Amino acid sequence: MYAVTIDSGTTNTRVSVWKENDIIAESFRSVGVRDTAITGSKETLMQGVREAIDEAIALAGIKDRNAVTFIASGMITSNVGLYEVPHLLAPAGLKEFSEGMVKAQLPEVSDQPIWFIPGVKNNVPNVTVDNCESMDVIRGEEVEVIGILQKLQLKGSAILILPGSHSKIISIDEKKRITGVVTSIAGELMDVITQKTILANALQNSFATEINETMVLKGAGYAEKVGLGRTCFSVRILDLFDGSLSLNDKANFLMGAVLGGDILAVKYSTALVVSPDMPVIIFGKKMLREALAVLVKNDPFFAGSLNVMGDEYKSLAGFGALTIARERGILK
C-alpha cells in the first residue's frame, strides 16, 4: 500500500508519495488558494493539484491507484480550497484530528477519494475588537505539529515556534494537544520592509545571510523600547552614519526588531497557554529559526529547554498526516 499526502497552502502545493515512512516521489506546483481568491474559481487550484498528483504517482511508478490512500491538509480545506472542513476547537490533538478527518470524492482532482484533515482554531466565542487578540486559526501547521511531536517523542507541554512568511506560535499541553495558536506576519514584514520601503537602499534589498547575535539582540531591544517603526528607520540612520556595519549586520538588526515581536507574543499573548518552564521547539526557515533561538536564549523569561530542529527534519507535514491517518485506521 502507498499513501499520497497533499500539502497545499496559500501559494504552493507539495505532493509526496510514501511507502511506509519513506518518500519515494514528490511533485510541486506553484498553485494554492490565493489563485482561488484572486480569480473566484477553483479551476486553477484543481488543475495544479491534479497535475502534481499525476506526476508524483508516475514518478513513483505506481500503476494501480486502488493501492493508494490520498490524504490532504492545509489551506486546501478552507472555504477557498478544494473541500472545506470546519476548524476543530482547541484543545485538539492526534485523537481529535483523526476523528475530524473527512473523506470526499473529487473526480476533477483524483479518481480515488481524498481524506481531508481539519485545521484548528482557538476557543473564543463571540469575537469582538475587545478580545480578537485571543483568537487565531491554523490550517496545515497542525499536521507539522503532529509530525514534530511524533519525531521528538515529546513528553509534557511545550511551546512550538514555526517561523516563515506567516509565523505560527503554538502551545501544547501535557496531553500533546494544541491549546492555542498565534500568527504573525513576521516574514512578510521583513520582505516588504527590505524590498519596498526606503530601507531597500540601506539594505540593498538583501536579507541576513549569517547570524550576528549582537545585532539581532540590539534590534529586538530597540523595538521593545521605541517600537518597530522607529527601530526600522534606525537601519537607515546606521547606514548613513555608521560605516563600520556590513549589509549583513544591518539585516540582522532588522530581523531582530521584527522577530522580537514574536517573542513578545509568546510571553504576553492571551491566545496561548504558556509558562516560563515550558520547553521551546523552533522549526522553520534557517535564518529565522536561528535568530529566534538567539532571542529565546537571551530572554530571562524562558527557563525551559530549547530545541532548534534543523533541515534534516523534512516533510513533517506529510509525516504528521500519515500519523493522523494511522490513528484513524486508514493506514496500517
Image (tube, rainbow, N blue to C red):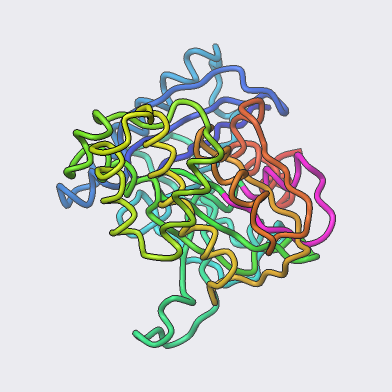
Q: Is residue 79 magenta?
A: no
Residue placed most toward the observer, 274 or 215: 215
* Rendered location of residue 105, percent (x, y): 44, 47
Q: Is residue 44 visible?
A: no
Residue 22, x across and y down, in percent: 68, 23
Q: Within the magenta stretch, is there residue 149?
A: yes
Q: Between residues 331 and 14, which one lies in front from this camera angle?
A: 14
Task: Name the residue at 63% across, 45% down.
Answer: 282
Quadrant including the N terminus: top right
Q: Is residue 316 visible?
A: yes
Region of the chain picked out in magenta, as a range: 145-161
Label total for image: 0
Front residue (pair 325, 209): 209
Where on the picture, by quarter, is residue 191?
top left
Looking at the image, residue 78 lies above or below residue 136? above
Give how far across and how far down residue 55 sits, in percent: 42, 19
Image-based side of 149 in relation to 36, left or right: right
Q: Position of residue 159 (x, y in %)?
A: 67, 58
Q: Which quadrant holds residue 185?
A: bottom left
Looking at the image, which residue sits at the far right? 155
Residue at x 42% of width, y 43% of height: 253
The quarter of the picture where the C terminus appears is top right
Relative height, residue 183 to residue 274 (above, below): above
What residue is drawn where x is 61% and y is 29%?
314
Left or right position of 145 against 118: right
